[in-house]
């Protein structure tokens, strides 16, 4: 399979949007322009962040302003919306915006995060809930009507209210998912289509991806492998690292404290693996944290979620991405700040060499 590249889309846009002074004004028109640009530049879609807006509202607005080449990847926390309602939302989206556009990014979240929404489940329980949830959603979007008695859900005549919406040709919305714990990897192996991971040194990532493949094979399945990365690509390596240094310099102490304070104890294994790469240390210069040639875990010092950036010249960035391709990665979700300008830069410099 050829390499697929998505971009990232978040309403907090700018050169360093985690600080108020590094943010630019963003409205619906700007976001629709960004989505249209992503489509025009040849990305196959965008991961929509859960940061500020509800992703369903944002995804519908962007899908209405773009063509079939823009496929939004929408985050879904299993358990926050009933499986029957989610199936109805998905079938409605596909019916209104065109088939084959919607994709789900399965987000299991952290225990503390989900408690804010009234969902009280511990780490491994979240994954059992997720497995049951997605098995139900798949049956519902394929047109089944059924009763179900499970650990987390009891459904009666489920799917009867969806009969007026055409079922999906492929039976289900493609599931994209990242989970680094044994429980997360087991859910991925059995249920998802694209296994996502955050950037790590290739020798560490190789071991994890091999486990994912082994567990998928045990279920008689083969998964696509995706990687979420930030890029700081410039004409020269020196300019790229200077741009990373500037991000450290413009970030406030309050942001560092908010991002790092107390997070080392979070129960998300993916976050723990990211945190171990810098240990919560803010360096004087970015390159002090270089974990592998051109690989910098410093983005997680001031922004949540995936925190690894590839920093270097165009050729160096392409070389690093090809290292990941050699591990079996066939899908990249990329970003750079500002999102609009860096979408152009990456499309004009990196993608032609990644897709010779």
Image: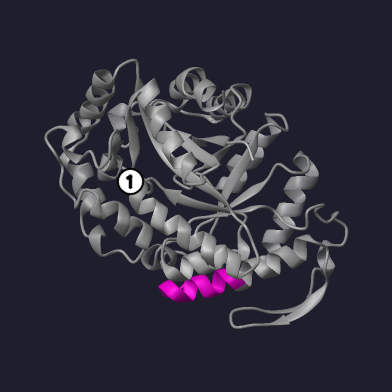
Residue 129 on the magenta span: yes
Residue furthest toward the right?
164
> What range of the chain is rendered magenta?
119-131
Residue 160's spot in the image, x, y percent?
84, 69
Task: Check residue 337 for magenta coloring.
Answer: no
> Of helix, strand and loop, which one carries label 1?
loop
Secondary structure of the magenta portion, mostly? helix
Residue 39 position in % (x across, y down): 62, 27
User: Position of 2 compared to 249: left or right?
Assistant: right
Specify the quadrant of the image occupied by residue 164: bottom right
Mark 1 — residue?
201
x, y percent for residue 123 = 41, 72
For the residue pair 41 and 24, the one nearer the viewer reads as 41
Q: Mark 1, residues whose alpha carbon is within 10 Å: few (<14), some, or many (≥20)? A: many
Tell me if residue 96 comes above or below residue 113 in the rendering. Answer: above
- Is 71 left or right of 92, judged from the image as shown? left
Residue drawn at x 69%, y 31% is 69
Query: Residue shown at 28%/43% (left/top)?
Result: 297
Viewer-proximal residue among 29 and 259: 259
Q: Quadrant of residue 193?
A: bottom right
* Quarter of the figure that contains the N terminus: top right
Q: Is residue 352 left or right of residue 231?
A: right
Q: Which of 143 and 285 is in front in this view?
A: 285
Compared with 42, 325 (above or below) is: below
Can residue 336 be seen by looking at this rendering? Answer: no
From this viewpoint, is residue 127 visible? yes
């Amino acid at each position: 399979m050829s390499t697929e590249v998505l971009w990232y889309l978040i309403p907090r846009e700018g050169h360093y949007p985690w600080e108020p002074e590094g943010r630019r004004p963003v409205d619906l028109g700007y976001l629709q322009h960004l989505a249209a640009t992503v489509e025009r530049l040849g990305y196959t879609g965008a991961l929509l962040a859960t940061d500020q807006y509800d992703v369903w509202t944002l995804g519908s607005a962007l899908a209405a302003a773009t063509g079939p080449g823009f496929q939004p990847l929408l985050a879904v926390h299993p358990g926050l919306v009933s499986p029957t309602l989610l199936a109805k939302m998905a079938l409605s989206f596909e019916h209104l915006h065109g088939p084959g556009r919607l994709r789900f990014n399965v987000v299991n979240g952290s225990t503390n995060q989900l408690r804010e929404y009234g969902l009280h489940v511990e780490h491994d329980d979240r994954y059992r809930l997720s497995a049951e949830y997605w098995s139900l959603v798949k049956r519902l979007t394929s047109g089944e009507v059924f009763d179900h008695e499970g650990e987390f859900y009891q459904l009666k005549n489920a799917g009867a209210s969806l009969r007026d919406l055409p079922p999906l040709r492929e039976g289900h919305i493609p599931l994209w998912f990242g989970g680094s714990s044994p429980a997360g990897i087991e859910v991925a192996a059995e249920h998802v289509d694209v296994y996502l991971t955050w950037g790590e040194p290739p020798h560490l990532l190789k071991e994890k991806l091999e486990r994912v493949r082994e567990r998928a094979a045990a279920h008689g399945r083969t998964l696509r492998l995706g990687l979420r990365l930030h890029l700081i690509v410039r004409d020269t390596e020196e300019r790229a690292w200077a741009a990373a240094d500037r991000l450290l310099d413009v970030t406030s102490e309050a942001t560092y404290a908010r991002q790092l304070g107390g997070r080392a104890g979070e129960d998300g294994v993916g976050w723990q693996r990211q945190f171990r790469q810098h240990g919560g240390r803010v360096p004087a210069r970015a390159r002090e944290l270089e974990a592998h040639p051109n690989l910098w875990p410093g983005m997680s010092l001031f922004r949540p979620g995936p925190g690894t950036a590839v920093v270097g010249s165009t050729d160096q960035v392409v070389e690093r991405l090809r290292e990941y391709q050699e591990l079996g990665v066939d899908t990249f979700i990329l970003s750079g700040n500002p999102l609009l300008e860096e979408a152009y830069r990456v499309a004009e410099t990196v993608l032609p060499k990644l897709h010779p």
